[in-house]
Image (cartoon, helix red, strand yellow):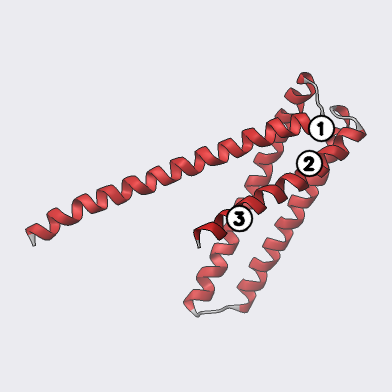
Amino acid sequence: MKYIFCFLIPILFFSNLNAQEFRRKDRQGMHRVEQLERLKLIETVNITEEQAIRFFARRNEHRKEIESIEKKIDESMEEIDKILKSGEIKESTLKKLNEEILTNREKIEAKRKQFILSLNDILTTEQISKLLLFERRFREEIRDLILKRRATFR
């Protein structure tokens, strides 16, 4: 028993370190993607330094609002998952959670529209159009990179 205990402690310790290292690298990767997005956005949309400062301040505020709503969606999804796994399915509870998810998704779209329309005092109409195109293309580019990376690991 003593030998098993001595053997398991280092394994648990090192597996915990690996998980922490993975989360740290994941955050670093996200930070790099955000920096790349920022640089490409400034270049593609052709914004001045003053516009960039105002734009990114407003965008950061917008992203915080969106993250808050997404957290509510995640919580509802987790609750649905628990209910379905438990086998004790209550239709009324599931309907309520489904409605909450759909309502929150609508809120995200409304906030996004509000954000884009609020940029008229910072960016020109042409720059806003370039921003919309950039966001779509950047998402597609990142998605394609992730899919390619997954394919190489299989």
The quarter of the rendered structure image containing the N terminus is bottom left
Query: Which residue is outermost to the right?
Result: 125
The picture places residue 68, in percent across and down from the top left corner, at 63, 46
The picture places residue 73, in percent across and down from the top left corner, at 63, 57
Q: Quadrant of residue 35?
A: top right
Query: Which residue is outermost to the front?
Result: 152
Q: Secondary structure at mark 2?
A: helix
N-terminal of the two: label 2 or label 1? 1
Q: Identify which residue is drawn at 50% across, 80% down.
A: 87
Q: Amino acid at mark 3?
A: Lys
Count all numbered tags in the image, as a single digit: 3
Quick check: 89 left or right of 135?
A: left
Q: Identify which residue is drawn at 56% across, 54% down.
A: 149
Pointer 1 residue:
45
In the foreground, 64 or 14: 14
The disc label shown at residue 33, or none: none
Quick check: 103 left or right of 120?
A: left
Q: CA distance from mark 2 to mark 1?
A: 8 Å
The disc label shown at residue 148, or none: 3
Q: Are marks 2 and 1 in contact (CB under 8 Å)?
A: yes
Pointer 2 residue:
134
In the displayed structure, 16 sits above or below 124; it is: below
Q: Identify which residue is drawn at 64% across, 66% down.
A: 97
**Label 2, residues with CA under 10 Å away: few <14, some 14-19, many ≥20:** some
Quick check: 60 left or right of 20?
A: right
N-terminal of the two: label 2 or label 3? 2
**Label 3, residues with CA under 10 Å away: few <14, some 14-19, many ≥20:** few
Asked if residue 60 shows in the view, the reply is no
The picture places residue 74, in percent across and down from the top left corner, at 59, 57
Q: Amino acid at mark 2?
A: Phe
N-terminal of the two: label 1 or label 3? 1
Between marks 1 and 3 in the image, the one whose residue lies nearer the viewer: 3
